[in-house]
Image: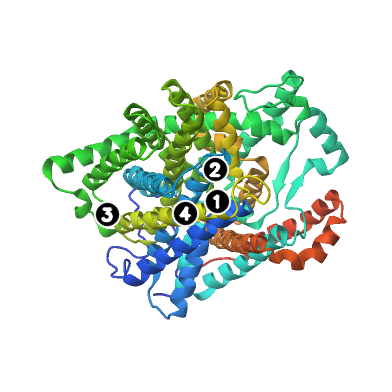
Amino acid sequence: MKKNMSLPDNAQRPLKPGEKYQPLLGDGHVFAEVTPYSVSLGLLMTVLFSAAAAYLGLKVGQVFEAAIPIAILAVGISGALGKKEALGQNVIIQSIGACSGVVVAGAIFTLPAIYILGLDVNFMQMFLSSLLGGVLGILFLIPFRKYFVQEMHGKYPFPEATATTQVLVSGESGGKSARVLAVSGLLGGLYDFAVSTFGAWAETLSTTVMHWGQVVADKAKLVLKLNTGAAILGLGYIVGLKYAFIICCGSFLVWLLIIPLMNLFWGGQVIDFMGTGITQTLSQMSPEEIFRNYARHIGIGGIATAGIIGIIKSSGVIKSAIGLAANEFRHGRSTAEEAGRCERDLSMKKVVSGIVIALLAIFAFFAFGGVVHTVWQALIGLVIVAVIAFLFTTVAANAIAIVGSNPVSGMTIMTLIVTALVLVAAGLKGNAGMVAAMVIGGVVCTALSMAGGFITDLKIGYWIGTTPAKQEAWKFVGTVVAAATVGGVMLVLNKTYGFTGDGALVAPQANAMAAVIQPMMNGGGAPWLLYGIGALIALLLTVFKVPALAFCLGMFIPIDLNLPLLLGGAVSWYVGSRSKDEETNRARSEKGTLIASGFIAGGALMGVVSAILKFAGADWFLGAWNHVAEGHSASGAEAIAIVPLLALVCYMVRASLGKKSR
């Protein structure tokens, strides 16, 4: 493998007419991908990270992304074993291992809610919910692979895929790129570790730290917040100024207009759309509470509508995929077998057959697995899963491609509301209805989580030049292992700690889902007005040719996670526009991307370490520091935070501008 290897110049920009992207390991390369080493290590990573992510996500409420730490470990282990040209194998290890994070997210967001509601769910129900959801997510996404990773090449930033690819490529090639990635990864990791574990300075800057800001927040419900993390700053750099600005416009609409207006016109009223037992008036709530209880649902409605619009716009892609499958069934010939290695997917015949088998298995699971009472109710559950999972698959993939964050919790909340309303109408309510709704929601949640995560793996493979069909086939195996691990871990955790009472597991997402489903199954309503407002906003954005999904993601994701994207995007623009020489600008931008990838990788890895320390209670040694930190005022902690944040930005700018040319 060549030293100082890097992605081609056209890896992250739109291709010119007649130009073609040539991956690092093109069709002419002969290299190992699926081997006993890569498969066994990938499955080992799946077990370890599935157990760790489920354990820590439920115990300390901190869900970490597994893909980047797995890539780092794959590179490190390959190097320690002295393996040559291990890049193709490391992609497979990362792709299989990444099943852990997405399956965990789908499971722990929903299934623990059954325990929280005082009901019961067995291992087989948890296993099948995660397995069938994951399999459906893979199958629904495969027909869209070429659209997202090939036809939309250079139009989406793919921040997480970019960071992971840089880790894999730099780790394989060594040289200057590896050193830059290592230094920035160490810096970003230590920076985020200092915040999350040591509490060295405030994690979030807020206008409420000033007296006037607190008064404005209390009276007008107007506040701005900015997360100071290095990883999110790095995400913003890769997302770029255009998308970061659009995302933040969605946040500004919600936080600077909608929330203050809601307080102005309905501040003295108690509004409980879903019958969740809200007793406070809007004026008694903080801006954050108004966002969680009301404004966020506008974002959910917008995301759903933007997804449907996206389906309509990509109808040509869907029609092409269906036509391809029909042609294969008719003539028994697979175009996948005729394509070059780097463009070879599983045949559409296998994909369509797999979807049919998966849907039949889901129906059997619902009907005979103790999920619902009647075949009719099982059929209703199947329709809900099939329709919502299919419609939102592209939403999940789009969201990951744009901002690296999957709004799966919002889509799952909408799924639960729709499921509850339909099941109640079909005569299934009360305790049995709540179990059924959560299991159905778990299938959908895992499907969407898998679709979003898998598009990252496929983009990594596309940039590097591995075989898509091999990634797709072995993803199913990883999903089986992850589903079994997560089900077992949740069963053990419930028996050991429980989800209610003193010392119970935190499970914040599952508690939120339980709070939604319980009133719905007892005659509660749905926030259709808020969903409708979000839908109208998405339609207007589409009419005025503004990317609706990016804007609506900004409405859904908290503003403190969006403003750093704008800061990182501004750094990206500045770095890439200082010189009159385009070659110099491009070289500087590429080095900035490497630094940003290091921030993301370091932050992800140290996030795992921080969560483990918190769980183990090992942060006792930080007691003296924390005691001192608690003695400072909030304003002091936030004032301190400005200094390291500015230092981090300055480092990114100066280090990037130091790159004059290749």
Tell me the amino acid under the disc marked 3.
Arg
Between discs 2 and 4, the one toward the N terminus: 2
Residue ID for mark 1 = 494
Amino acid at pointer 2: Tyr
Question: At numbered mark 4, what does the secondary structure look like: helix, strand or loop?
Answer: helix
Question: Would residue 377 be found to the left or right of residue 298 on screen?
Answer: left
Q: Which mark is residue 210?
A: none
Q: Earlier in the sequence, mark 2 or mark 1?
A: 2
Query: What residue is at 46 percent from the left and 77 percent from the top?
Result: 79
Tell me which residue sits at (39%, 31%) in the image.
Answer: 384
Query: Left or right: 24 with respect to 324?
Result: right
Which secondary structure lies at badge 1? Answer: helix
Q: What percent of the width, then of the height, locates residue 393?
A: 41, 40
Q: What element carries label 2?
A: helix
Left or right: where does residue 452 sit relative to residue 500?
Answer: left
Q: Mark 2 points at which residue?
A: 115
> Which is more N-terminal, label 3 or label 4?
3
Callout 4, which amino acid?
Val
Residue 83: image x %, image y %? 40, 78
Q: Do the residues labelled 4 and 3 touch (CB within 8 Å)?
A: no
Of residues 433 and 604, the one drawn nearer to the viewer in this rendering: 433
Q: Identify the secondary structure beneath mark 3.
A: loop
Q: Which amino acid does label 1 sit on?
A: Asn
Task: Pick whichever of labels 3 and 2 is earlier in the sequence.
Answer: 2
Q: Do the residues labelled 3 and 1 touch (CB within 8 Å)?
A: no
Q: Mark 3 points at which residue?
A: 344
Residue at image mark 4: 486
- Residue 485 drawn above or below residue 269: below
Q: Do the residues labelled 3 and 2 touch (CB within 8 Å)?
A: no
On screen, 4 above or below 369? below
Which residue shows up at 26% across the image and 59% down it?
A: 341
The quarter holding residue 645 reads: bottom right
